[in-house]
Image: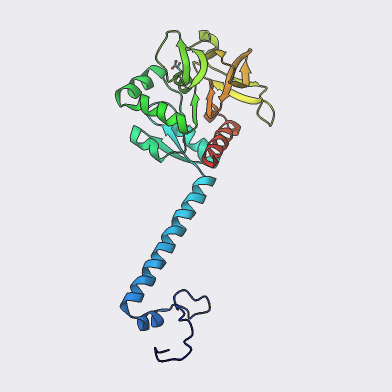
Amino acid sequence: MTGTDKNPQPRKNPLLDPDGPELGDDFLALCGERNRCFVERLRGEEEAARGVEARRLHRAEHPSIGVLAIQGDYAAHATALTESGAEPREIRKPEQLTELDGLILPGGESTTILKFLEKRGFFAALQEFAKEKPVFGTCAGAILLAREVLNPPQRSLGLLDAIVERNAYGRQIDSAILTAETELPGGPLEMVFIRAPRIVSTGAGVQILARRDGAATLVRQGSVLAATFHPELSADRRVHELFVEIVKAAQAR
Ligand code: GLN
């Protein structure tokens, strides 16, 4: 088409015309350097967008859940998370929290973990993290989440409206494997207790999902989950699956 045509047809842009030619290399060679660069940039952008979308979909299906890996049984939590459909990450620095959709504070010795958290600016970072993202504490982790800790009193994150007493069971029964009724679907739940704390009282917003001798052992307050036992040491994955569901629901918000 030239400028001298009487009734010029609107010019079609071959790059945008769905019925236009395949944009093979021969065609691009004919189009000249400028168009070739343009198409290559478009292709690159499309590919990058597809990559970002694929990663977003993957992460929605398999959320990235951190396990505080300072001390204690974090490796067993990582296995339980993988088996529950999440992607576990070992976390040792507060900067790593930004990569996560949720976090587990594992069992261990709460005083040791607390000292570590207080030294690296982790303590405040965790409190900030929990405003946006779900957190799950098991045993020592549950102690760290509590509003108040007894026997002896120690500082805690105050993310769970509960009072928790450390080493609350006498020497003979402080470590035990018990099976008890639970609010989780699927029948009774095995609970492995190791020098376990006891949840002495809970606030009105705290849901009790399992008990030992009347005292709450598995509780949920919104996107905060806490167990005084070690679900990562049982073959039953219902507790970790619940946490993964809580994380997915928070992602979708
Ligand atoms: N007894 C420990 C504490 O008080 C908790 C034990 C555990 O995490 N298994 O911190």
From this view, report whether residue 155 is shown above or below residue 128. Answer: above
Q: Residue 71 or 20: which is nearer the viewer?
A: 20
Q: Residue 103 or 172: which is nearer the viewer?
A: 103
Residue at image location 43% in from the left, 22% down from the top: 108
In the rendered picture of this protein, how many numbered marks are placed on residues?
Answer: 0
Q: Residue 61 or 230: which is nearer the viewer?
A: 61
Quadrant holding the C terminus: top right
x and y, in percent, of residue 184 in the image? 65, 29
x and y, in percent, of residue 87 in the image? 48, 42
Quadrant holding the N terminus: bottom left
x and y, in percent, of residue 18 in the image? 52, 75
Residue lying at the far front of the rendered structure = 6
Residue at image location 48% in from the left, 12% down from the top: 167
x and y, in percent, of residue 226 in the image? 53, 24
What coloring was used for the rendering?
rainbow
Q: Quadrant of ligand 1?
A: top left
Residue at image location 68% in from the left, 22% down from the top: 181
Quadrant assignment, res 122:
top left
Residue at image location 56% in from the left, 34% down from the top: 246
